[in-house]
């Protein structure tokens, strides 16, 4: 098990991030830093950054967290998810010298969601808990390819090489994993 | 109107993980503009990324970086100029594609490949190419196969191949084992964004005849 000092409840982390955005709370920022910075460093090291570069990107990512925290919406994402996306975009920016290409929510061409069920923070948190549980329940070979997807620069062909399995097998395991997660969350397959 | 043909889960996962190249990212981001279903899928994959981040074993303490960072919190932010929308109202290009093109369809350098078929390169990254195609109503594209994967997002009009009938927002996926001969709908010119991660392989007589001109 992880030591208590470095482990925080997902709800607490999200609360801290809200306070950083709303109140510019430096203590909460420091607490978030203590939880996430060492994990972001591990993430970046797994993606092949050397020590110095990893620390550099961690600092930039946490500075971006401070600056963008106002736009964090706890009904849409957990703190961990939001911080992951901030760090991911920064990594694409810094390491590949590319700008991450994303859709624009204000695009006049945006096809809107059908009005779904309540999009509140509680429901979001419950589905996040379910997702984590489902992730733990994945069969080992599927969990491995999901995890590797997030920690390889060129995931699918490289995962295939590293595991010594065909590319098609990597893809089908990923698809199996995703549909398992979908059904664990009770989502209909469209 | 919602898309019926989507990118595969592994592609959406790779997009969420941040490991797709620019050409594939452009295609996925353009599809996401048109597809709430896949936006939800990507959000879920990002939540996976977040869950995995929480579970990473922390490296040693980075408190020595924290003090320096706390001092920088009030530094003025670098000014990021967000590119203004450049296409006319009513453009059929989703924003990510407008930005990649630097405007609208008429600003592109279209290359005529044959009667009723035009192509414009949008961007290339590594071995991947993103190209726009403009296909005359009713035209049959030369039969071809693929060494890698070819993904085609319809932006206007539609086309059919052995696997189905594709309309705006839909993505047709063709990989190694697909040899197809898409046919454009009769109504309006079909405009689509195609991304390949390896050169196309033309088959059939027409394919061999056209191949030197296609420069695929
Ligand atoms: Zn979709």
Image (cartoon, grey):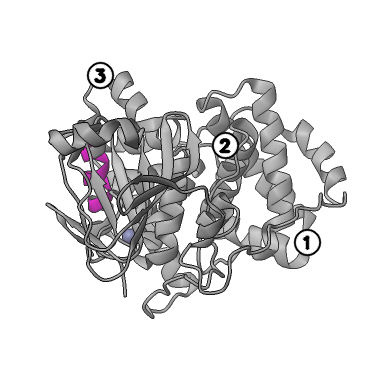
- In the image, taking residue B137 as reference, residue A59 lies left or right, namely right
For label 1, the residue is: A24
Please report the bounds of the magenta region as a residue range: A172-179
Q: Farthest residue to the front: give it.
A: B115
Q: Quadrant of residue A14?
A: bottom right
For label 3, the residue is: A164
Q: Residue at x 45, y 75 (%)?
A: A119
Whether pointer 3 and pointer 1 mark residues with C-beta atoms closer than 8 Å, the reply is no
Q: Chain of mark 3?
A: A
Give the class, few, some or many, for how many residues have Cα within 10 Å of label 2's Cα (few <14, many ≥20): many
Give the percent coordinates (x, y) of residue B82: 70, 57
- Please indicate, yes or no, whether residue B99 appears anywhere in the rendered image: yes
Label of residue A39 in the image: 2
Q: Quarter containing ligand 1?
A: bottom left
The C terminus of chain A lies in quadrant: bottom left
Give the class, few, some or many, for how many residues have Cα within 10 Å of label 3's Cα (few <14, many ≥20): few
- In the image, taking residue B98 as reference, residue B213 lies left or right, namely left
Give the percent coordinates (x, y) of residue B181: 17, 47
Q: Chain of mark 1?
A: A
Q: Is residue A62 above or below residue A186?
A: above
Main secondary structure type of the part rendered in magenta: helix
């Amino acid at each position: 098990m992880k030591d208590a000092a470095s482990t925080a409840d997902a709800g607490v982390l999200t609360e801290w991030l809200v306070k950083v955005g709303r109140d510019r709370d430096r203590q909460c920022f420091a607490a978030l830093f203590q939880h996430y910075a060492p994990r972001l460093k591990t993430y970046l090291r797994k993606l092949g950054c050397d020590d110095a570069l990893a620390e550099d990107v961690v600092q930039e990512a946490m500075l971006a967290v401070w600056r963008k925290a106002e736009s964090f919406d706890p009904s849409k994402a957990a703190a961990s998810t939001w911080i992951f996306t901030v760090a991911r975009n920064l990594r694409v920016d810094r390491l590949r010298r590319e700008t991450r290409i994303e859709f624009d929510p204000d695009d006049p061409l945006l096809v809107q969601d059908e009005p779904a069920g309540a999009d509140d923070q509680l429901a979001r948190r419950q589905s996040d808990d379910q997702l984590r549980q489902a992730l733990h329940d994945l069969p080992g070979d599927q969990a491995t390819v999901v995890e590797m997807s997030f920690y390889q620069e060129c995931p699918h062909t490289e995962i295939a090489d590293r595991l010594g399995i065909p590319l098609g097998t990597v893809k089908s395991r990923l698809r199996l994993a995703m549909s398992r997660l979908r059904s664990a969350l009770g989502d209909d397959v469209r | 109107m919602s898309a019926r043909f989507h990118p595969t889960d592994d592609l959406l996962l790779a997009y969420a993980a941040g490991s797709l190249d620019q050409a594939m990212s452009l295609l996925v981001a353009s599809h996401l503009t048109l597809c709430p279903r896949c936006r939800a899928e990507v959000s879920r994959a990002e939540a996976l990324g977040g869950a995995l981040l929480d579970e990473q074993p922390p490296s040693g303490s980075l408190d020595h970086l924290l003090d320096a960072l706390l001092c920088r919190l009030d530094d003025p932010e670098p000014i990021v100029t967000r590119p203004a929308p450049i296409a006319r109202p009513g453009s059929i290009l989703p924003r990510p594609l407008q930005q990649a093109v630097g405007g609208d369809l008429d600003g592109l350098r279209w290359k005529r490949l044959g009667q009723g078929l035009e192509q414009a390169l949008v961007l290339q990254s590594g071995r991947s190419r993103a190209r726009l195609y403009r296909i005359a109503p009713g035209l049959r594209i030369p039969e071809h196969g693929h060494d890698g994967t070819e993904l085609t997002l319809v932006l206007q009009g539609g086309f059919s191949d052995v696997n189905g009938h594709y309309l705006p927002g839909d993505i047709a996926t063709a990989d190694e084992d697909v040899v197809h001969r898409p046919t454009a709908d009769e109504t309006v010119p079909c405009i689509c964004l195609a991304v390949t991660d390896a050169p196309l392989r033309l088959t059939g007589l027409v394919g061999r005849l056209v191949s030197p001109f296609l420069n695929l």
